[in-house]
Image (tube, rainbow, N blue to C red):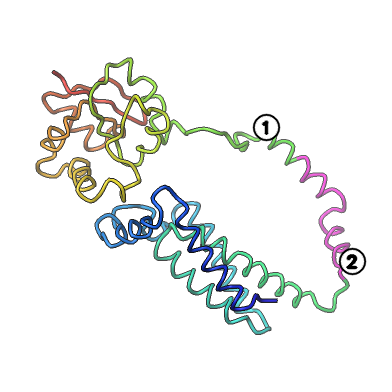
Amino acid sequence: NRQSPVAMSVAGVLSLAAVGLNPVGFRLLSHVTGFLHSRFLVDNTEEYLSPNFHDLGPQLFLVLLLVAMVSLAMNRRRVDLVDLGMLVVWTAFALYSARNIPLFAAICLPMVIGLVSQLLKDLGAGMNRARRLATIERQMGGPLLPLLAVAVALLISMGDLGGLHPKIGFDPKTFPVEALAKAKSVGVRGNLFNYFPWGGYVLYAGYPRYRVFIDGQTDFYGERLTRDYLEVARLEPGWESVLDRYQVGWVLFPHESPLSLLLARTHGWRLVYQDGTADIFIRER
């Protein structure tokens, strides 16, 4: 049964009041809306862009969305208009900005499961459930399939299937794990200019010894700093003056990136560390 409008209204008011339970209070609302008004920051922050369906997360979202569409098309019963409206609205939000995909999953997944469940019930109507399960089990080898599933699960939990066992940590092929560990020994000093996607890792693994130039929190860094970062990363005219203005003493950037390749040929910079993931350059005195 659906909640009454009064109960839903009270829940909405309480949820809005809960927004103020943070160190900056209700100023958080103006901060978020102000950030969204900056088209430059939004268009240059990955989580605010449309999903990249070449990545696994958006691909799972796409599968869920296709399942929802097929279930709606094949469902013989009338679909609740509120559920349909929520599905349409949150689909639009998720397609517009990748950061809305988790919200889509939290809100719409129960609806999609309900649609699939109803569809399966309709397709299986008139068939004895116990008989159907027995038929499926017999076709798939009786008790062999459950035993095989348990065996595979045990092998995965023991890590015996070639790396399928999940590992906790940062992939050194994606993050500058080794480079940051060697930074002190290679003589880094002064202010850091880091690769934008690595900012969070540097904060995690290097703070307070190393302070990032920028990370994914562009709403706090602001448009000016973000533009300065992109000017250097894209090697736009005047990029060297940006490093001078911020008194950058060392650079941590992807191996053989355009910036790394140019710094290797730029007077006043010296390559002191490199691996397959990251390069470290220091400014020569």
Residue 1 x/y as whole percent: 70, 76
Name the image quarter holding residue 114. bottom right
Work out how far the residue at label 2 is from the one at label 1, CA to CA, in angstroms: 36 Å
At label 1, which amino acid type do we have? Asp
Residue 55 x/y as whole percent: 46, 52
Mark 2, residue position: 130
Residue 160 x/y as whole percent: 67, 32
At label 2, which amino acid type do we have? Ala
Q: Name the residue located 83 percent from the left edge and 62 percent from the top edge.
A: 136
Q: Are marks 2 and 1 in contact (CB under 8 Å)?
A: no
**Quick one: 237 or 54, which is closer to the camera?**
237
**Magenta-colored stretch includes residue 130:** yes
* Direction from residue 261 to residue 164 in the image, left or right: right
| For discs 2 and 1, the disc positioned in front in the rendered view | 2
**Quick one: 261 or 114, which is closer to the camera?**
114
Mark 1, residue position: 160
- Position of residue 94 relative to residue 258, above or below, is below
Magenta residues, start to end: 129-151
Q: For mark 2, does the 10 Å Cα neighbourhood hold few (<14), some (14 to 19), or many (20 or more) residues?
A: few
Secondary structure of the residue carrying tag 2 is: helix
Task: Give me the disc on residue 103.
Answer: none
